[in-house]
Image (cartoon, helix red, strand yellow):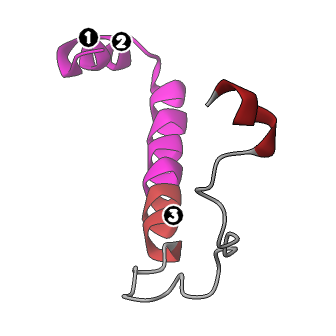
Amino acid sequence: MSDVELLKKVSELPENLKEELDSYIDFLLQKHAEADLSKKPLKFGMMKDTFIMVSDDFDEPLDDFKEYM
């Protein structure tokens, strides 16, 4: 939806709904600002020791496929 279309719809609203819309816009802006603040900044090494190590023979062919090789 373009800004022009949105402004046209808003201009056609009665005054009480415009006030309600204004309050809702303020709510959305505040919610968006709080969501941005809650994100932690990424730091180098923050995922250290969070991954499961795979076994040493992970890249070896499976026994089930020996007859095809």
**Residue farthest right in this picture:** 64
Marks 1 and 3, the one that precedes in the sequence: 1
In the displayed structure, 12 sits above or below 24; it is above
Q: Which residue is mark 2?
A: 9
Amino acid at pointer 1: Glu
In the displayed structure, 3 sits above or below 66; it is above
Q: What percent of the width, then of the height, locates residue 29?
A: 43, 54
In the displayed structure, 4 sits above or below 25; it is above
Magenta span has 56? Answer: no
Q: What percent of the width, then of the height, locates residue 10?
A: 36, 20
Query: Which quadrant of the figure has residue 6?
Result: top left
**Residue drawn 79% across the image and 44% down it:** 63
Marks 2,1: beta carbons within 8 A: yes
Q: What percent of the width, then of the height, locates residue 1?
A: 30, 14
Q: Report the span colored magenta.
A: 1-29
Q: Badge 1: few (under 14), some or many (20 or more) residues near its Cα, within 10 Å?
A: few
Work out how far the residue at label 2 is from the one at label 1, CA to CA, in angstroms.
6 Å
**Residue drawn 66% across the image and 75% down it:** 53
Q: Which residue is mark 1?
A: 5
